[in-house]
Amino acid sequence: MEFSIKSDYSDSRNLCVVAGVFEARRGRFTLFAKQIDQVSGGYLTEFLQRGEMEGKLANVLMLHHVPGMTARVLLVGLGKEKTYREAEFRKVVRAAVTALDSAGIQRAFLSLTSGEAPQDTSWRIRQAVLVAEEALYRFTRCKSKKLPPRRHALRHLTLAADSPELSANETALSQGRAIAEGVRLARDLGNLPANICTPEYLAETARDMASELKLACTILTPKKIAAEGMEALLAVARGSRQEARFIHIEYNPSKSMGRPLVLVGKGITFDSGGISLKPAAGMDEMKYDMCGAAAVLGVLRAAARMALPVPLVALIPCCENMPGGAAARPGDIVRSLSGQSIEILNTDAEGRLLLCDALAYAKRCKPVAIIDVATLTGACVVALGHVASGLFTQDEDLARALAQAAETAQDRLWRLPLWEEYGEALKSGFADIANVGGRDGGAITAASFLSRFVDKKIPWAHLDIAGTAWSGDKEKGATGRPVALLCHYLLQRAQARDAPADKAL
Ligand code: BES
Ligand code: MN
Ligand code: ZN
């Protein structure tokens, strides 16, 4: 979709203008709605007085023939003014965009980004772009018939700003576009089935993106992965006919930028469980087990598009977890890249086996910090549901910065503890560590396992996105989370570059 920024709605190409109404006894106009009401000689007021629009959150009312207006007017309820905040803004924009699109409107003016709240104009512009793109996203690549054209009516959205000439607005707009593009990439990759989105497909995607955006990219094939000593990753890969790939891709805005932030993404293109096979019901959803990988690629794309002054390295171990003849068996012991031996008690706890090798490899990049992203445990879904991603870290600065970015992005996370005691469950009688603890605290024992492979001196955070990376509702599909969260974290870092270096987390 296209976006532009203006203060004035009266472009004759606009087929509709969106005006907000707060919830009050007879509804209460925003400044913009009041202006339209005056132009129309009080026409809008009638709808409020008749109780046809009370301003209830995300309610919409399309008015076709408004006196003095060539465009239609879409009234949208903002809820009570006191409670009109970030989440409400997003709901309202989503409702407006959906209504415009299903009414077949191709071009519209969105007044909601002007005014005073929530946050500032830049935030509202960024979010409006993100929400609009998110709301109209459809995954149609595997359908032979195109969806009816009406579904994709909305082509251009003009966002209101009180001072449209400010360069900050344009910056926010291009940030919104870049992040939305990253989110879209992550959703597309997530939604692709495992017979198309194989480890090699992910590698190809990375390679293509790298040449398009001038990033350095190396793909390791099984031979090279073995030569490096990533035995844990290979132990998972061997059960499948699909070969493993290890993607190493770098975004380096300039040579003098210093040490990179390393992002690690779990790239299991299908998780059958391996020999510890999963039950049949819902197993199709395990095509989403590469959403960590997809998110990391999305973030890299967005960061490069925004030309952020933050050097990044993405490490993405990719393979398929299948019960083939060469698959790892429960009880097998493998040596990880870190040198530690691992007893594989459950082949379905495969994510941590890829990640532990990638985390050990990460040390070579001399990172300022490491963040891994993974659909790691069903236990995290039990704990946090589908609202918040799980955050695990022992670094308070990183925790604070990520929490702040999550709030700003409205891509939420919640911290769970990572105390030493949780490591007890992973004791093995035969190897240095077992790959599973018990059922209890499963998300935390998984994180605790990973912590054993990260140098304690490097700030590290683990995001468990098992509950947030896709939605199982009737609108089933990948969400693109936590691309927006991580992009906002990078924006924060870029800003903090002017602040003292040690505060730059
Ligand atoms: N990919 C799954 C985690 C998962 C489960 C994500 C359900 C989303 C929804 C992971 O590889 C896995 O199978 N984890 C096991 C770990 C267990 C064997 C310790 C789990 O959560 O059941
Ligand atoms: Mn598994
Ligand atoms: Zn998995």
Image (tube, grey):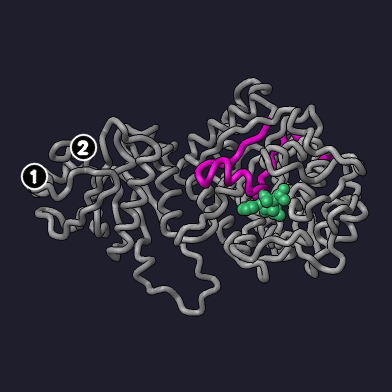
Up-down relation of residue 156 to residue 374 (above or below): below
User: What number is the disc on residue 322?
Assistant: none
Q: Measured from the top left, where is residue 352 in percent x and y?
A: 76, 47
Residue for point 87% across, 52% down: 331
Q: Is residue 253 visible?
A: no
Between the C-alphas of marks 1 and 2, the distance is 18 Å
- The mark closer to the camera, 1 or 2, is 1
Q: Is residue 384 magenta?
A: yes
Helix, strand or loop at mark 1: helix
Report the side of 461 relative to 426 (left or right): left
Q: Measured from the top left, where is residue 98 in percent x and y?
A: 34, 57
Q: Measured from the top left, where is residue 204 in percent x and y?
A: 71, 63
Q: Is residue 356 visible?
A: yes
Q: Which residue is mark 1?
A: 49
Q: Quadrant of the C terminus?
A: top right
For residue 22, what is the image quadrant?
top left
Q: Which residue is mark 2?
A: 31
Q: Earlier in the sequence, mark 1 or mark 2?
A: 2
For residue 462, what is the image quadrant?
top right
Q: Residues within 10 Å of mark 1 (few under 14, many from 20)?
A: few
Q: Quadrant of ligand 2?
A: bottom right
**Amino acid at pointer 1:** Gln
Report the side of 327 relative to 128 (left or right): right
Magenta range is 364-393
> Along the line of sight, which residue is nearer the eye, 445 or 314?
445
